Structures are given as structure tokens and as C-alpha cells.
Image (cartoon, rainbow, N blue to C red):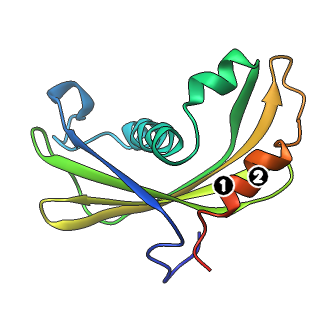
Amino acid sequence: MTRGAERTGTTSCVRHRVPFYETDAMGVVHHSNYVRYLEIARILWMEEHHRPYREYVAAERHFATTRVEVDYLHVVRFDEEVAITVWLEWIRGASLRMAYRLEGPAGRVATAATEHALVDTAGRVRRIPKEDREQMASLLAR
């Protein structure tokens, strides 16, 4: 994960209030839920800054997750709000990387990154169309 860079480009932020079922026996958000939070934020980012993910699905394309990194810094508990901020870190011919900052009542609770490859419905890697790559690349900070 890129350390030190807070934002690399255009961001989106989604807020989520933690329901009880997302917590574990210790009363904190179970680690597996963070991956869901990242997905929600990534899909929002695409809708706000690129195009709705459902358009990729309609074209029989998906951004398959190939890597997930999460650094857990502080716990989040039931009924607390977590804000997930996401931005595009890089984009290549068939893949991209999103970076995330998660904040709760105590401040930063996690940092994360996910990498994705564009695939067809058979799981074969496909190049991201040039116009999509160029448009998304324009959202990176220069």
C-alpha cells in the first residue's frame, strides 16, 4: 500500500453506521466486513466519477478483485459511524488500484487498497477500453 499519500486524485466518501450483526464476540466490527465497505465505496466512486458499474455488468465485464490490503489501526463498534474515502491510485492496460481511508469516532481506523482486473463473464482478462482508461487516468492527481 502506498504510505504517506493521503489522496492521489478525485475522491468519494460513503458513511456507514455499523449494525449489530457486523460485530463479533468482542463487540467490534468483524474484519471481514471491511472488504464489503471497500466495495461499497469503490462502486460509489465509479458512479460519481466514471460511470455506473451496472454499465460494465451490462457489457458483460467485471472488475475482478485480485488483491486486498487492509491495515487495521483502531476498532469500530456497534452503532458507530465509519466514513470510507476512496480514490483511484493507478490505472494500467487491464487493471486498476483503489486506495481507501476509513475513519470512525476516534479518527483513522484503517487504510486499505484493492486491485482489480477487467474480465469478461468467462473470467478472461480484457483490456480496459482506451477511452475509459484515459478518462479515469484524468482523475489522478498530477
* Quadrant assignment for the N terminus: bottom right
Q: Is residue 133 left or right of residue 31?
A: right
Disc 1 crowd rating (10 Å Cα; few below 14, some 14-19, many 20+) is: some
Q: Amino acid at mark 1?
A: Met
Which residue is depicted at the point 38% across and 44% down? 31
Where residue 67 sits: x, y (%)? 67, 49
> Judging from the image, what secondary structure is the residue with disc 1 in?
helix
- Identified by mark 2, the residue type is Arg
- Residue 126 vs residue 101: left or right? right
Q: Position of residue 130 (x, y in %)?
A: 85, 48
Nearest the camera: 116 or 132?
Answer: 132
Q: Nearer the viewer, residue 98 or 107?
A: 98
Task: Report if residue 71 is visible in the image.
Answer: no
Q: Identify the secondary structure beneath mark 2.
A: helix
Q: Residue at x 88, y 42 (%)?
A: 127
Q: Is residue 20 left or right of residue 6?
A: left
10 Å neighbourhood of mark 2: few (<14), some, or many (≥20)?
Answer: some
* Residue named by callout 1: 136
Q: Looking at the picture, tell me which residue is in the foreground, 48 or 24.
A: 48
Residue denoted by label 2: 133
- Which residue is at 48% across, 83% downward? 4
Residue 124 to residue 98: above or below: above
Asked if marks 2 and 1 touch (Cβ < 8 Å), the reply is: yes
Q: Quadrant of residue 119?
A: top right
